Amino acid sequence: MATANDSSQIRIAGTGRLFVAEAGAAAPVNFATDWDPQVWKDLGYTSTDGVTFAKKDKLDPVETWQSVSPARFIYADRDLTLKFSMLQFNESTLPFFMGGAAVEPVASADGVFSYAISDGPQFDERALGLEFTDGTDVTYRFVIPRGQVTASDDIKLARKAAALLGVTFTALAAKEGEPLATFLMKDPAYASAVA
């Protein structure tokens, strides 16, 4: 049973990693196993702001003539998003930020690559994985099996700051009966859940 005041259960995401894969990819459940690089592409360095995790539910009230308070609520919407800024520019991060397609070598120019930005938005569904650690005994993995970048921040190119690829990734409904997202925890704080 959880205790009221237990500082060992306070979590600080000391360091973390972000990964993308094809929609539907599963995260490694065994924490002795790393993310398979054949499936999951590490997005590399991110800004010191880390990741902003947001869950917003919209409830619509059912109003009645007999009461000034709602009689009940109807769930109208759920948004689950991760917002973060990537620092590395490469064949994984640029298409993820821009919304799909691929970086291609330019046949007529050795060592030159091209990325074509579509004239209209494309569907670019992906799986997103997040891992963070707090010390040596606590690791969390969070997986959205199906989602898409729904907002991209402006890229500022300046002499005194690194260029950032800032995105907001929004979870999309999974198959019937499957979760929108999943937390996997290697954390002694949850040991009482199996008692």
Image (cartoon, rainbow, N blue to C red):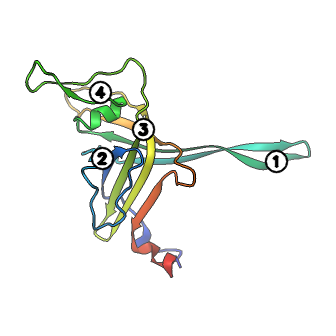
Q: Nearer the viewer, residue 154 or 39?
A: 39
The local crowd at label 2, few if under 14, some if 14 to 19, many if 20 or more residues have their Cα within 10 Å, is: few
Q: Earlier in the sequence, mark 4 or mark 2?
A: 2
List x then y, in percent, for residue 147: 45, 42
Q: Residue at x 36, y 20 (%)?
A: 118
Q: Which residue is mark 1?
A: 69
For the residue marked with disc 1, what is the amino acid?
Ser
Q: CA distance from mark 4 to mark 1?
A: 48 Å
For the residue marked with disc 4, what is the amino acid?
Lys
Q: CA distance from mark 3 to mark 1?
A: 41 Å
Q: CA distance from mark 3 to mark 2?
A: 26 Å
Q: CA distance from mark 3 to mark 4?
A: 26 Å
List x then y, in percent, for residue 163: 25, 32
For the residue marked with disc 3, what is the amino acid?
Glu
Give me the disc on residue 86.
none
When asked about the image quadrant of residue 125, the answer is top left
Q: CA distance from mark 2 to mark 1?
A: 44 Å
Q: Answer whether labels 4 and 1 touch (C-beta < 8 Å).
A: no
The local crowd at label 4, few if under 14, some if 14 to 19, many if 20 or more residues have their Cα within 10 Å, is: few
- 98 in relation to 18, above or below: above
Q: Secondary structure at mark 4?
A: loop
Q: Which residue is mark 4?
A: 156
Q: Secondary structure at mark 2?
A: loop
Q: Residue at x 23, y 35 (%)?
A: 91
Q: Secondary structure at mark 3?
A: loop
The local crowd at label 3, few if under 14, some if 14 to 19, many if 20 or more residues have their Cα within 10 Å, is: many
Query: In the rendered view, does 13 fall on the left or right side of 77?
Result: left
Q: Which residue is mark 3?
A: 125
Q: CA distance from mark 4 to mark 2?
A: 17 Å
Q: Answer whether labels 3 and 1 touch (C-beta < 8 Å).
A: no
